[in-house]
Image (cartoon, rainbow, N blue to C red):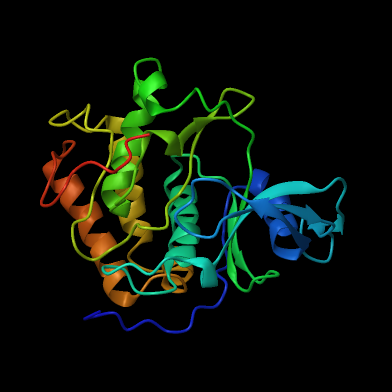
């Protein structure tokens, strides 16, 4: 792909909120046991169990307790796409987590890039959820949260925001998953969340986006994302953040098909 001067990525530093750190260390360092493929996935996707590992990380870490569940998406199982560089979907999954943690929303389960039984891939914490609760059934009661999901999808250039990618965990907290087709350099936004077109961006969300723009000028966040995205993709991310702030409102559908399929 033109402008895709991608180096072989190293695992990013993943500077995240303290409440994620213990789980991140489990995902990085535990033994990964695939339990079986998840149904209706377009790429090889496995429910897995993480045994052992270290809680807390670093010299002060302690042995982990009970196994935790995770979703393992190995690079070798990715279906080739005509418009995304081959073997990069797992990197984009991790980049979405890194970006969401820097921005402060939406909630993406902790995700790391690591080796496993089927090779390197994205490993994301599995959160139990109610399949009857997704965007189309929650959008009215959680409109403020979905405004932030919509803004995140604009800057991440999410090409596949289905309703079923917006879920609620057992504690009633919203989280979002499946970000393998984000961060393309060309406009690709396909989403079910078009409810807020033309609305001004809320002041607190705008302040977070302004802070993110500063973080993307250089420093730890750029280093972390630079291990996962090409230089051209990182420049396009900066441009989308700047354009969204300049417009000051939720954009409408752009070029191409605006909705994913299937919708849910």
Give the vertical position of 184 relative to 208 (above or below). below
Relative image position of residue 153 (x, y in whole percent): 31, 45
For residue 248, side relative to residue 155 (left or right): left
Q: Residue at x 53, y 72 (%)?
A: 76
Q: Residue furthest top?
A: 141
Q: Nearer the viewer, residue 145 or 69?
A: 69
Q: In the rendered image, is residue 55 in sight?
A: no
Relative image position of residue 221 (x, y in whole percent): 45, 63
Q: Residue at x 51, y 44 (%)?
A: 108
For residue 74, side relative to residue 104 (left or right): right
For residue 80, side relative to residue 176 (left or right): left
Q: Residue at x 59, y 61 (%)?
A: 112
Q: Which quadrant of the rendered structure holds the N terminus?
A: bottom left
For residue 113, side relative to residue 213 (left or right): right
Q: Which quadrant of the rendered structure holds the C terminus?
A: top left
Q: Nearer the viewer, residue 214 or 71?
A: 71
Q: Residue at x 27, y 40 (%)?
A: 191
Q: Can you tell which quarter of the image residue 142 is in?
A: top left
Relative image position of residue 109 (x, y in whole percent): 57, 45
Give the vertical position of 105 relative to 174 (above or below). below
Q: Nearer the viewer, residue 258 or 202?
A: 258
How many labels, in total? Answer: 0
Q: In the rendered image, is residue 129 in sight?
A: yes
Give the vertical position of 121 relative to 254 (above or below). below
């Amino acid at each position: 792909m033109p402008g895709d001067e991608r180096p072989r990525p190293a695992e990013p530093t993943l500077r995240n909120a303290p409440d994620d750190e213990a789980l991140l260390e489990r995902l990085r360092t535990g033994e990964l046991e695939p339990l079986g493929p998840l149904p209706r996935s377009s790429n090889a996707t496995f429910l897995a169990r993480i045994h052992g590992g270290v809680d807390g990380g670093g010299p002060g870490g302690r042995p982990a307790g009970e196994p935790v569940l995770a979703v393992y998406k190995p690079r070798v199982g990715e279906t080739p796409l005509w418009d995304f560089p081959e073997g990069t979907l797992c990197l984009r999954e991790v980049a979405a987590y890194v970006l969401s943690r820097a921005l402060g929303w939406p909630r993406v389960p902790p995700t790391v890039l690591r080796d496993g039984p089927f090779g390197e891939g994205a490993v994301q914490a599995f959160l139990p959820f109610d399949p009857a609760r997704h965007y189309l059934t929650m959008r009215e009661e959680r409109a403020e949260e979905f405004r932030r999901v919509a803004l995140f999808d604009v800057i991440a250039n999410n090409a596949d925001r289905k309703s079923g990618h917006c879920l609620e965990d057992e504690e009633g907290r919203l989280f979002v998953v499946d970000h393998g087709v984000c961060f393309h350099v060309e406009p690709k936004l396909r989403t079910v969340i078009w409810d807020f077109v033309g609305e001004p961006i809320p002041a607190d969300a705008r302040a977070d986006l302004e802070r993110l723009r500063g973080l993307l000028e250089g420093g730890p966040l750029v280093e972390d994302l630079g291990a996962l995205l090409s230089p051209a993709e990182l420049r396009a991310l900066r441009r989308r953040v700047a354009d969204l702030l300049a417009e000051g409102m939720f954009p409408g559908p752009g070029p191409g098909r605006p909705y994913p399929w299937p919708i849910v």
